[in-house]
Amino acid sequence: MSIKIAVSNLDKTFTLHTQGGTVINVFANLNLEVRSGECVALAGASGAGKSSLICSLYGNYKPQSGSIEILHDGVMIDMVTASPREILDIRRHTMGYVSQFLRVVPRVSALDVVAEPLLNLNGNVDEARAKAASLLERLNIPSALWNLPPATFSGGEQQRVNIARGFCVAYPILLLDEPTASLDADNRQVVVSLINEAKQAGAAVVGIFHDEEVRDLVSDRLFEMHSFKEAA
Amino acid sequence: MTYQEDLMPGKSDATDNDAGYNYGYLNEQTKRMIRRAILKAVAIPGYQVPFAGREMPMPYGWGTGGIQLSACLLGPNDVFKVIDQGADDTTNAVSIRKFFARVTGVETTEKTGEATVIQTRHRIPEAPLQEDQIMVYQVPIPEPLRWVEPRESETRKMHALEEYGVMHVQLYEDIARHGRIATNFMYPVKVDGRYIMCPSPIPKFDNPKLDMSPALHLFGAGREKRIYAVPPYTDVKSLDFEDHPFQVESWDACCGLCGARDSYLDEVILNDEGERMFVCSDTDYCSSRRAQGNFGPMAGREDVAELMGESPQTA
Amino acid sequence: MQTFNEPMIHAQGVTKYYGPMVGCKDVSFDLWPGEVMGIVGESGSGKSTLLRCLSGRLDPTSGSVSYRSDEFGDVDVHDCSETVRRKLLRTELGVVHQNPRDGLRLGVTAGANLGERLMSVGARHYGNIRKEAAKWLGEVEIDADRIDHFPRTFSGGMQQRLQIACNLITSPRIVFMDEPTGGLDVSVQARLLDLLRNLVSRLGLSVILVTHDLAVARLLAHRLMVMKSGEVVESGLTDQVLDDPQHPYTQLLVSSILQA
């Protein structure tokens, strides 16, 4: 199977200029390859840099050195040096990201929040809304809520809207940051099937799963991360 | 027009002249400056040429711009006519006519056909103008864009760059508010396909008379010190919308005195019972028609005799 | 939505001095079709000076700004005739001022304000102008029956929405916005932001957005330039600049706000 993500010699530190220039080392010399149809679960104690790695993969954090090659439109593009425009294009077509929290946009209905990524991709409102509706239904969001902005939803409902949004486009690469954190057993099961379906369709998945049961059901291998202090 | 005479002050026939003033009231340097401005205005139809307007012996708003133009135009052989609200016998018209009779000694007339220079504020005469005639207009606000753009620096730029979209804003507002273009006076025109021009406070009824007119039309704004012109045979188009084309006023009635249906009519209240009638605003046109034997429905009435220019037949 | 291979705006070394004072210094970037770029920084950091240079309303001391115009091809904004520049400002460019009163004619009705841009590019059919004006009132969520009302009878938020509609009615390609939500209360701001966000993405506008409000920048902008004392100290993808700021000033800016 083809390599979709190739991380090599990645270093990430935070320099806190507002706090006297304190430097926090997150990880150094990190190497990782993820192939099509494969799910890699990031493992390690809290503070080991799992979320930072996901954020770096998504272009949200800026690594200090090394490279993150992403297979986009048939070519490998380095997220570390790519222009904002390229990164946005990669995010639109290639790489999806489900964070822990839904960033609520005022006045936009749950259905449109979910449909937005697909709409941005193909511009077809009906198709995007139909796909969004099927995902919300699968994730057991009552249809009475679909036309309401998710700002007032419960934590679990917001999380499910967020997941639906992440799966609305069949991205070749999926990044998941604790997608099942606040879900009940039934919905966890739905998320597990969504992930496995994406894998079968050839997606490369990198995720953080604190729930071991979910992790065992979806991941093909663990990528152990140690906090920098431990490694040093 | 010949100017040789008045270039030699004192040389002209001074029988009727007021010896204390230069011929035509203004001094020769001022006339020369204004004539240059006139030439420039004629060369660029519709363009407002600034000029160094002088103080005239009358308040701004009473026609100081028009007077300065006339003062520069009138030669001893000219025949001068002044109309105010279409009439030759109103106070302002009489005063201006007398003023020029005194400072130039030119012949004056009330007949449109006889005049070579016609100074006016509100009307263009009904009788067709000729090639050897000059219309002089007294203009209160020369800038057609002023209504939408108060900054002079900006309106000049808009003229220079032909940015005239805002002119239609005014017409749009009219239709939005009244269902039709309700602007009846100072209706903006485009001159020679280039400059938007304000045709002084003439009714839009008179706008079509400017188009391809054989006469020269000169506009003078005394307070704002601008001169502009429509040369003979120039294209003058009134602004409009495709679905609200330019239309002139029309009346159901005819002139009560001369029966004319093709002239601009004023409404006159006759008595305390509210009886009213319409009469030609152009008094010369009206009396000429009557002289030719045309009479309107009210012509025979005694109480309108004054309107016909006759003294009331009281005992 | 689309990717084009030529930038809409190409800015090269834009520098503006006010006497010895730096307005903005050596700013270069490309803005692509459909892209929204935020310029953030505190008051006095040169954001508005830069915006005025970019929109052609202020001549820079050095540097150049060019647009890719439909009508005129590549246009150097500061080296073209005023006719072209002003034509662009009426057609392919839009400018949304912080104070809507700077962008509207308060003495004429909402409909006439909307119609003016159409009429300025030659629309001469009253019925069509009115239809288009009513459509754009709807787009910015103003009741169509307000079309004959004067903007001065509108609330601040409505005036701002009207100003935006007045800019968008001629389908511009590039819109410059200076603090478009400044001076509005929070709920009005939220509505306006959502509206802008939808219009920008649906119409594929290229936008340069000046704001000191990082939350506004996050919601609307694809990428950011952070300015301090007239210079760009950091630039990049919006979420990267806000979530992992590199420059000390950006970190200060991000940590100074309650929540972006």
Image (tube, rainbow, N blue to C red):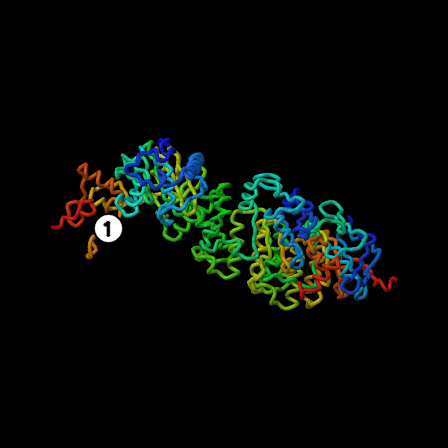
Q: Tell me if A88 is positioned left or right of B200 in this view.
A: right
Q: Residues within 10 Å of mark 1 (few under 14, many from 20)?
A: some
Residue C30 location (% of width, % of height): 67, 46
Of the pair B256 and C1, the residue shown nearer to us: B256
- Could you tell me which secondary element the residue under label 1 belongs to? strand
Residue A64 location (% of width, % of height): 80, 55
Q: Quadrant of the rendered structure where residue B35 is?
A: top left
Instruction: Classify B3 as above or below C186.
Output: above
Residue A154 location (% of width, % of height): 63, 68
Q: Tell me if B249 is positioned left or right of A92 in this view.
A: left
Q: Tell me if C42 is positioned left or right of C108 in this view.
A: right
Q: Outermost residue toward the left?
A: B315
Q: Residue at x 63, y 44 (%)?
A: C8
Say which amino acid is labelled 1.
Val
Q: Residue at x 17, y 38 (%)?
A: B293
According to the image, label 1 marks what residue? B268
Of the pair B74 and B243, the residue shown nearer to us: B74
Instruction: Classify C72 as above or below B314.
Output: above
Of the pair A131 and B311, the residue shown nearer to us: B311
Asked if one can make out residue B104 in the rendered structure from this viewpoint, the answer is yes
Q: Quadrant of the rendered structure where residue B14 is?
A: top left
Asked if one can make out residue C226 in the rendered structure from this viewpoint, the answer is no
Q: Outermost residue toward the right?
A: A232
- Label 1 is found on which chain of the structure? B
Residue B55 location (% of width, % of height): 40, 46
Q: Residue at x 50, y 54 (%)?
A: C104
Where's the C terminus of chain C, which quadrant? bottom right
Q: Residue at x 39, y 34 (%)?
A: B231
Instruction: Classify C73 as above or below A7.
Output: above
Q: Tell me if B189 is positioned left or right of B262 in this view.
A: right
Count the numbered circles shown: 1
